[in-house]
Image (spheres, coloured by chain):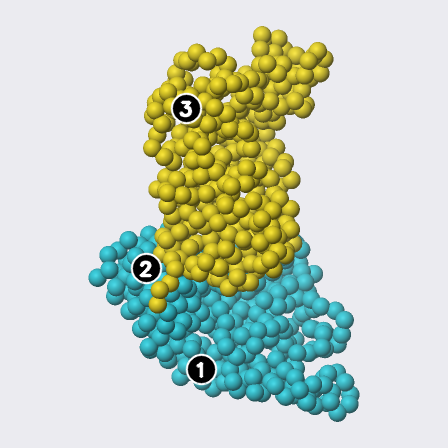
Amino acid sequence: MADPIYLDHAATTPVRPEVLAAMLPYYDARFGNPSSTHRWGREARTALDEARERVAACLGASADELCFTSGGTESDNLAILGGWRVLRSTGRRGVVTSPIEHKAVLEAVHKTVSEGAEERMLAVDEGGTVTLVDARAKINDSAALASVMWVNNEIGTIQPIAALAALAKEHGVLFHTDAVQAFGKIEVDARTIPFDFASISGHKIGAPKGIGAMFLRRGTPLEPLFFGGTQDRGRRPGTENVACAIGLATACELAVAERETSSAKYRLLRDRLQAGILAKVTNAVVNAGCADRAPHILNLTVPGADGESMLMALDLNGIACSGGSACQSGSTGGSHVLAAINPAASTGASVRMSVGSLSDEAAIDRAIDVFTKLAMKASGMVAA
Amino acid sequence: MSQKPRVLVAMSGGVDSSVAAALLMREGYDCVGVTMKLFEDGANLPDRPCCSLDSTSDARRVAQLLGMPHYVLNMVDHFGHDVIADFVSEYAAGRTPIPCVRCNTFTKFSDLVAKADGIDAAFVATGHYARVAGGQLLRGADDNKDQTYFLWGIDRGVIPRLMLPVGTLTKPETRQIARHLNLPRVADKAESQEICFVPGGDYMAVLRRELPADAPALIPGPFVLSDGTVVGTHEGFARYTIGQRRALPGGSAEPMFVVAIRPDDRAVVIGPRAEILGNGLIARGVNWLTDPPKVGDEVGVRVRHRAPIVAGEIVRLEGTEVEIALQSPVAAITPGQSAVLYSGDVVRGGGFIAASRRSRAPMPVLS
């Protein structure tokens, strides 16, 4: 088998060499605890403070508006539960979200329901985009919090975050956006869009797994999830992950600096992949193909093919991609996102391919070749 | 480069399928491991997210140790329809089902074979104690473990694609190999005789969940003797199976057994041991794994798992229905269980028992 091809950058990415190099000293000579008052501690504190400023700057924010977390899931939980638990005393009970959110958001919202919240699901159109008409009905004066992802992780649709955040602000509703797939691909700037919370994750942009951040606008109330220390103003107690925070800062700066060029490159590669497959697998359907999509994600349904067999066969033939999101204990169960936008997707094989730093034209062309052969065989089409 | 063919190995996380995978890897096959997720259980309990998350983890760990890819397949929908729903409707109809037969017929050796086709796997392997030779299915070498009783329903055309590596071993040998291969976690796992989707063996809990509360199988009905005398009340005929002695009314001079279950009037018929002996049976839904036998042929017959194989004769064969006369009487021939037919070690086929018969004279054809 030729070298395998990685087309699952939406699941995770390799740590960039610049990121690793920036981190290493903080596992070695500069190992101090930033809460210590001695020189080792001060050195670590300096690096941590700088990392916080650097990540904040990448989001158009100030350092005090940024919490380091273990990643996207923690950021989502902290924003939704932390925001809700303060707001519930105001009598506002509505917690608004969409059915195509990451499970970290959906499960956190379900948790608020067990604490007295009223869940409000926004309608999503066939293109996988939240409809503003429905948002206007549900993000109102009785809502406490709304959470809508910026870019969907399975189909790549870009949600109308500017309009939703403005609507929430108008009604005094806290607005959270899971920007894990958006950051580094499209502009995420707290100065231009009035979101109250935003989640980002390191390992989607070349930093290690286990580090992420949550933006919270200055003055936004928050009840912490953890207790036992004053780190991060008590919002996120626990000795800070200094090396990873530095890694995240480095990766964020690179992502922002390269955003326009890398996004343009990813879009070309993604579109090449899409066109190459559709040219031969003529019955394949691009999910959310008509919607405004982030540049790196392609989600296809091959009618009449078995999804599990298709994913296994792709992997065994060297193409790494995924069914839904990669977070379901290795299981290739059905996608709640596709179920929400296109129930017919369950009658075929749905595959998410996501391009990134490891992708080039040669890899894309080889992937087209392998995918096409397998898809045509799996759906009973005769190879041309 | 000559590579041995690809084999899709069904791995449950137990010792048998783990050793099967290990043996095939040792022989150089291109093995791909899969674990089937067959049902949801305790979905609302976050600390127990799935029936088989532990066993899935064990299977994955074994695959990692052996150096083979491993995938989890979600077969919940098909299994629920083909196996669990049938299990429930059989009890509701007064029979005693064997879900393992339908799982093998529909899930493992049909749905899973389709997955194998999808990855160009020439073979499907499992940890069953049975053997394949010359396109025929043979009893496992370990008489205590032979699982052919559950395998009669598979498509005959699939047999040449089966690999059953532990079928030539005894269970102690399998465990020994697991220890040698450093698979200690699975080597000493307790034997599971339970139905996988019936935790703790409490099948009544499954029936209560799946059937309406007023289903005839779950509400009280009469205990009757074969002469019609009512001798008590039971709490639902689904609690009973032919030959059962527990939970019957007392007061008889000799031990009493369940003789029949009559869903129409919800009666559980009880009687002395003589009444549960059968000299023959009628089986339906018959499937042949060899060329079909003819009327008058002698066959070995097994009427329940691990029961001895007894001599019988085919007395009627019409479509997918077969009637068999037994040379000597057998106790508790139970509708819903399987009748599996053998010639020596070769599995000829089988069917679901529809009725037992007490005399050797041919019975009228059941409509």
Labels 2 and 3 positioned on one and the same chain: no
* Distance from Cα at disc 2 to Cα at disc 3: 50 Å
* Circle number at residue B298: 3
Q: Is residue A59 above or below residue A374?
A: below
Q: Which residue is mark 2?
A: A375
The residue tagged with tag 1: helix, strand or loop? helix
What is the crowding at mark 3: few (fewer than 14 residues within 10 Å), some, or many (at least 20)? many
User: For mark 2, does the 10 Å Cα neighbourhood hold few (<14), some (14 to 19), or many (20 or more) residues?
Assistant: many
Callout 1 amino acid: Arg
- Note whether B179 is above or below B151 in the view shown: below
Residue B321 point in image, percent of width and height: 38, 24
Please provide percent x and percent y for residue B189: 63, 49
Q: Residue at x 61, y 43 (%)?
A: B192
Return the residue at label 1. Answer: A259
Q: Which of the chains bears the disc numbered 3?
A: B
Q: Residue at x 51, y 28 (%)?
A: B309
> Is residue A144 visible in the rendered structure shown here?
yes
From the viewer's perspective, tell me whether residue B365 is left or right of residue B184. Answer: left
